[in-house]
Amino acid sequence: MTETFQDAMLKIHCCHFYRGVYPWVQNYLVTPYWRFYWNPTPGACIRIGGRVLELTPSDFYVIPGHLKFRTFARKPFDHFFIHFKLNDRLPLRNEIYRLPADPEGIRLIREFQELEGHPGNELPGHIRALAVLTPALLRLDRELFRLPVQMDSRVEKLCRKIGLHPECHYANEELAE
């Protein structure tokens, strides 16, 4: 496995299902973790900029890392979340992605909910969280996950050299050295 691929791998930091969350006050939340939310009951809200987003049971939400937002609740709600890490070289995003909640994802979250809190079920729960998260991420525009191109330092050095002296004609052998 190449280093670039390893860096881009998805790593779950934590995932839980909580019932009756209230109040849900997090002011100016900014973390390197991406977040996946699904709330089977209404009541949770996210404030991003001057906009308020009401989290609905019919949607999954993906929140990029380093995004500044605040949370609050209008009433108690149930909350499933996954905090996860993606490659730090991904460009920063300033929006929350809303996806229609799919029946298979909801089924897996319900199974996760049944397993949570029972010793020895951490790995099966983690696998279900990955099974919910991966298809959701695949439904997003793949350009969202395009890593910036990193050139080999030797190639960068050659490009600088040629850029500084475009009038010069270098032999391939000279450039290869």
Image (cartoon, grey):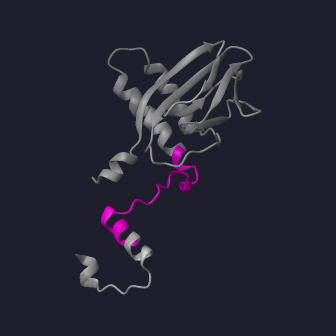
Vertical position of residue 1 compared to residue 69: above or below: below
The spot of residue 8 in percent (x, y) is 40, 47
The spot of residue 76 in percent (x, y) is 68, 14
Vertical position of residue 121 compared to residue 106: above or below: above
Residue 12 on the magenta span:
no
Question: Which residue occupies the foreground of this view, 32 or 175?
Answer: 175
Q: Is residue 58 left or right of residue 153?
A: right
The spot of residue 10 in percent (x, y) is 41, 41
- The magenta stretch spans which residues? 137-159
Q: What residue is rendered at 55% in x and 36% in y?
A: 66
Q: What residue is rendered at 55% in x and 52% in y?
A: 144
Number of dots carrying numbers: 0
Vertical position of residue 63 compared to residue 73: above or below: below
Question: Which residue occupies the foreground of this view, 154 or 68?
Answer: 154
Quadrant (top left/top right/bottom left/bottom right) for the C terminus? bottom left
Q: What residue is rendered at 64% in x and 21% in y?
A: 27
Q: Is residue 100 left or right of residue 36?
A: right
Image quarter for residue 169?
Answer: bottom left
Question: Which residue occupies the foreground of this view, 19 or 67?
Answer: 67
Q: Is residue 35 left or right of residue 116?
A: right
The spot of residue 54 in percent (x, y) is 73, 29
Image quarter for residue 141?
Answer: bottom right
Question: Which residue occupies the foreground of this view, 168 or 96?
Answer: 168
